[in-house]
Image: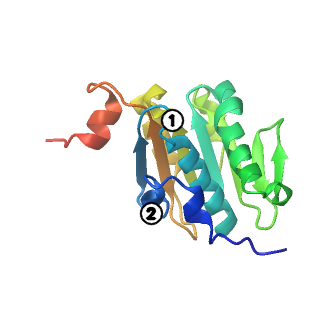
């Protein structure tokens, strides 16, 4: 199979988020207003990782599962199409999985509205919490616990959301020091 050329990548990614594209920290926080390209930049980073790094099982999450189809699933599918890579992916609309055929890496889409279903998902290598301000702190704690074990590549939780109230758990958990 032909090797995919990513030399054009900087021209596709928002300048503001490009420095985070290769960030390997456990938690990557992207927040900004509507239209700031945080979700698009996240989807681009994840598609890039699935192509470049074999063995991924990236869990893309929303608070409610049914909202995934028109948001994260559609966005990942859209990036794949924009980059002209559709022929390299198997897109299963019924079970909402997207697999990169050359190396088997895949995206799984779910909601935290049924925690029991999440417990059965194995070997997750990274997670994307889209509209994370809708999640409860306990949701995050459970998802953080699920991202464990040894893998060839770094494990990361990408948390994207719009500006929040100062009293929101995301603010106290990630932005304010705990004294």
Q: Is residue 89 visible?
A: yes
The dot on residue 35 is: 1
**Left or right relative to 152: residue 50:** right
Percent x, y of residue 140: 45, 37
Labels 1 and 2: the sequence-earlier one: 2
Q: Residue at x 49, y 55 (%)?
A: 156
In the rendered image, the vertical position of residue 33 relative to residue 77, given as above or below: above
Which quadrant would residue 106 be assigned to in this image? bottom right
Question: According to the image, what is the colour scheme of the structure?
Answer: rainbow
Q: Residue furthest front?
A: 11
Rendered-image quadrant of the C terminus = top left
In the rendered image, the vertical position of residue 99 relative to residue 172, given as above or below: below
Q: How many marks?
A: 2
Cα separation, mark 1 vs mark 2, equals 25 Å
Percent x, y of residue 103: 76, 67
How crowded pointer 2 is (Cα within 10 Å; few <14, some 14-19, many 20+) is rated as few
For the residue labelled by badge 2, is the local secondary structure a helix, a strand or a loop? loop
């Amino acid at each position: 199979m032909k090797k995919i050329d990513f030399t054009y990548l900087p021209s596709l990614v928002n300048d503001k988020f490009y420095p985070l594209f290769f960030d390997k920290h456990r938690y990557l926080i992207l927040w900004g207003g509507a239209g700031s390209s945080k979700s698009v930049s996240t989807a681009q980073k994840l598609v890039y990782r699935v192509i470049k790094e074999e063995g991924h099982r990236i869990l893309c999450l929303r608070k409610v599962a049914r909202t995934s189809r028109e948001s994260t699933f559609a966005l990942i599918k859209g990036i794949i199409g924009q980059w002209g890579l559709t022929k390299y992916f198997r897109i299963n609309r019924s079970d909402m999985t997207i697999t990169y055929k050359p190396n088997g890496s895949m995206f799984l889409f779910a909601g935290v509205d049924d925690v029991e279903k999440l417990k059965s998902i194995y070997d997750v290598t990274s997670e994307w919490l889209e509209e994370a301000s809708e999640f409860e702190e306990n949701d995050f704690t459970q998802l953080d616990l699920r991202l464990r074990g040894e893998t060839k590549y770094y494990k990361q939780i990408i948390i994207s959301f719009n500006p929040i109230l100062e009293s929101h758990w995301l603010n106290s958990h990630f932005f304010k020091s705990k004294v």
